[in-house]
Image: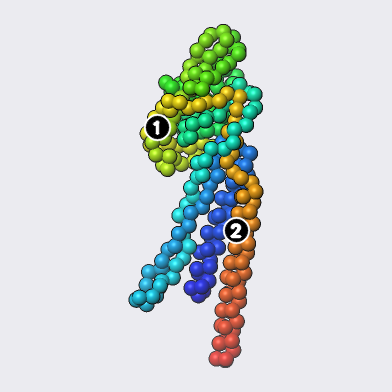
């Protein structure tokens, strides 16, 4: 295969990765606090691909993905266990079987034993690193802007842990809307927590669909180019073979 086909094939693979990322964004357009992902590509210059003083052959290299950390829109639900964080880059902490994870998806509920849990059943942690559990007598649950949880019967029950990673760029997704901090975190002094609210995904569906259409067109064009090059080479080989015979 000629260099032109190899370069086109590298771009084809990159477009395939981009389509997968865009499709995942669209699938999570209604996932609370989901943050859209973007692909990052760069050039990879093939060594010794051109004479001295001339430009080399540049292939497309997939460098990975990055997250759009913009805050999603806030939506009122009226559910006392739905919580939205007003402060940017502040996160809830939950305990999963794999360890403590961070999330901004504040769709919580009560488990059978009264523990506040996320949609996966993982307990929401307080500032001491322990699950927050309500008694059967607790009603009229109020959650203040600083994360303090209280009930009409028993007063203050605990305070929700809200933290900010020292380096958000080190965070890695571990499934759904959960992230590993991969570094130190610090308590957020003014998390601006809002009870009865949910932060929606920051995915813009129309924009993502437009990106998908563009990526699919690019993919189709490149696939046609690679096929045309293959046909041209096969025709050239057949002609040479026939002439030699």
Q: What residue is shown at x 49% (from left), y 50% (from top)?
A: 65
Which corner quadrant of the image does residue 76 belong to? Answer: top right
Find out whether the residues at labels 2 and 1 contact each other: C-beta distance under 8 Å: no
Which residue is at a point 62% across and 31% down the rendered structure image?
A: 75
- State the quadrant of the C terminus: bottom right
Color theme of the render: rainbow
SS assignment at label 2: helix
The quadrant holding residue 42 is: bottom left
Label 1 sits on residue = 185
Could you tell me which secondary element the residue under label 1 belongs to? Answer: strand
Instruction: Decide if residue 109 is in sight here.
Output: no
Residue sitting farthest toward the left: 52
Question: What is the tally of numbered marks visible in this picture?
Answer: 2
Task: Name the residue at 60% across, 28% down.
Answer: 197
The residue drawn where x is 48% and y is 54% is: 40
Cα distance between the residues tagged 2 and 1: 37 Å
Which of these two is toward me, 184 or 201? Answer: 201
Q: Is residue 170 above or below residue 21?
A: above
Badge 2 crowding class, 10 Å Cα cut-off, few under 14, some 14 to 19, many 20 or more, is many
Residue 186 in picture, x, y percent from top left:
39, 30
Judge from the rendering whether residue 193 lies leftward or rightward of residue 213; answer left or right. left
**Residue 206 circle label:** none
Badge 1: residue crowd in 10 Å (few <14, some 14–19, many ≥20)? some
Give how far across and how far down residue 140 sits, in percent.
60, 13
State the residue position of label 2: 215
Q: Is residue 138 left or right of residue 56?
A: right
Q: Is residue 213 above or below residue 121?
A: below
x, y percentage for residue 26?
Answer: 62, 46
x, y (%) of residue 180? 45, 37
Find residue 130 and report its image quarter: top left
């Amino acid at each position: 295969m000629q260099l032109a086909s190899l370069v086109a094939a590298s771009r084809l693979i990159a477009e395939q990765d981009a389509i997968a990322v865009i499709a995942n964004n669209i699938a999570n357009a209604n996932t609370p606090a989901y943050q859209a992902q973007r692909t990052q590509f760069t050039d990879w210059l093939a060594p010794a691909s051109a004479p001295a003083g001339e430009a080399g052959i540049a292939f497309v290299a997939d460098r990975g993905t990055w997250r759009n950390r913009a805050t999603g829109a806030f939506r009122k639900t009226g559910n006392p266990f739905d919580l939205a964080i007003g402060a940017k880059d502040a996160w809830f902490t939950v305990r999963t079987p794999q360890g403590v994870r961070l999330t901004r998806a504040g769709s919580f509920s009560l488990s059978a034993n009264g523990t506040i849990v996320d949609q996966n059943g993982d307990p929401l942690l307080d500032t001491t690193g322990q699950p927050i559990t309500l008694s059967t007598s607790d009603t009229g649950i109020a959650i203040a802007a600083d994360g303090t949880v209280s009930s009409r019967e028993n007063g203050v029950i605990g305070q929700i842990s809200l933290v900010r990673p020292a380096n958000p760029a080190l965070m890695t997704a571990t499934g759904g809307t959960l992230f590993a901090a991969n570094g130190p975190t610090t308590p957020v002094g003014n998390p601006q927590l809002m009870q009865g609210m949910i932060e929606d995904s920051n995915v813009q569906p129309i924009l993502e669909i437009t990106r998908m259409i563009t990526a699919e067109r690019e993919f189709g064009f490149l696939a046609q180019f690679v096929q045309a090059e293959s046909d041209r080479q096969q025709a050239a080989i057949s002609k040479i073979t026939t002439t030699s015979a």
